[in-house]
Image (spheres, coloured by chain):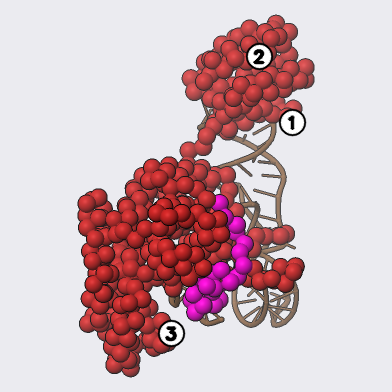
Chain colours: A red, B brown
Amino acid sequence: MSIKALKGFKDILPDEVGLWQMIEGKARDIFQRYGFEEIKVPILEKTELFVRTIGESTDIVEKEMYTFADRNGASITMRPEGTASVIRSYIENGLYVRGSVQRLYTIGPMFRHERPQKGRLRQFHQMSVEVLGSEQAMLDAEVMAMAWLLLQEIGLKASLEINSLGCPACRPSYKEALQSFVKERIAYLCEDCKRRSDANPLRVLDCKSDNCQDQYTSAPSIIEHLCEDCSQHFAAAKQGLDLLGVPYSVNPSMVRGLDYYTRTAFELITTELGAQGAIGAGGRYDGLVKQLGGPDVPGIGFAMGIERLVMLLGQKEKRASKTGLDLFLVTPGEAAYEKGFQLLQTLRILGVRAMTDHEGRSMKNQMKQANKQQARFVLILGDNELESRVVVLKDMLSGEQETVALSMDFENWAAAIKEKII
RNA sequence: GUGAGCGUAGCUCAGCUGGUGGUAGCACCGGGUUGUGGCCUCGGCGGUCGUGGGUUCAAGUCCCAUCGCUCACCCCA
């Protein structure tokens, strides 16, 4: 074996690209229905951007970022997620104007240096959606409903789990309450939870150990510790989902891996992907823009993992239906080949998807290629046809073929052929 | 970072307790059809058995190392 792709980096081969295009096309369609505009942001950013937004003590920043010095010695990082860059751009380009609400989405690759496994790669792709400038709970519901609709229209089933993570006013007191609860029974907990109880106490709640979960059944719930404002906000968000008929369940132990989340947090979960069940996740991040030096503007967003969507869909339909050619030109004979080469260009200029064989293969072989390319029609132009100024047009579905006069006025002739086949 | 499983043809895989690498399937090329695809049929191409050591008369098979892949933990999309 010669050079292979990096660990955790995958080629997306032509057979699979159809699914990708379907998913991205559907996403763009739906995002636009909700008034979102696309923004394209760089893949490399200053390392500091991610450290300040995602949080210094998160796993992503501590051990998963592709960070290196560029030729001038500046520390730069390949983005591990999309929100930070979008917000940076929002601030840098002054996309905020008084009273405006920006709806933005971006689609592209993200990079995290983790051990790859099913549904987890080092380069993966996300659709990242952000709304900046509103803290209305109805917006939370609208954003979740949009994510929900996207999955529906793609043809996937997932459950929506929501929670509220509180705000700087109420989260600290909950954290304390939880921490003291955990400390009381620390002797009964797994090693991971012992560690987490200091580093990130909220995380103990989604521990996978049954034993730990038994201990946590009576743990304090964040929802009961929300301040008045957060509590009302959460209630309103749920009401919004009810109004839109989007099913959900409240999961009080759901936590997010990034530090910047506040209030509404949500995940779209499937059980069909092995250990990596989250196909989309997001939430509100009200303090983030200000923290990055922008105005005090609230925000909410989510990201969906395209590879995970592709995997789920791929299980259903092995390969997306390939877009075949309109026409394949078969040219037995050299003189015919040259003339055909010209005709082909004329047809393509008129918008016909057409191909031919340049290898001088047998007619039978060329027919096989036409079939493999799923060409709807085959145009046969051999030396015989050339001599009698005709071409043979064969319908590959019915197998029927007709002889058509070949005019030397290529443009009119090609237009006539196009009429017949499209 | 931790643990487990697996590396045989381009792909998917047989290969038993060590005894000559499979008429295997798919794909590819050609014939059956002197210029007509799909289906069928016949033939062909294709392999340092991941790599390096070791045990043995003999290693794809057993042992060790190494590299790679996969899955799981952690964490996450």
The residue that label 1 is drawn on is A359
* Subunit ID for the residue under disc 3: A
Q: What residue type is labelled 2?
A: Glu
Point 38% across, 78% down: residue: A203
The label nearer to you, 1 versus 2, is: 2
The residue that label 3 is drawn on is A199
Q: Residue A401 placed where, x, y %?
A: 55, 14
Point 52% across, 47% down: residue: A16
Task: Check residue A213 for magenta coloring.
Answer: no
How far apart, in angstroms, are the residues tagged by discs 1 and 2? 26 Å
Q: Which of marks 3 and 1 is nearer the N terminus?
A: 3
* Subunit ID for the residue under disc 1: A
Q: How many other residues sit within 10 Å of disc 1, few (<14), some (14-19) or many (≥20)?
A: few
Depth check: A404 or A309 in front? A309
The residue that label 2 is drawn on is A411
How far apart, in angstroms, are the residues tagged by discs 3 and 1? 65 Å
Is residue A98 rendered to the left or right of residue B63? left
Residue bounds of the magenta highlight: A40-64
Point 28% across, 69% down: residue: A230
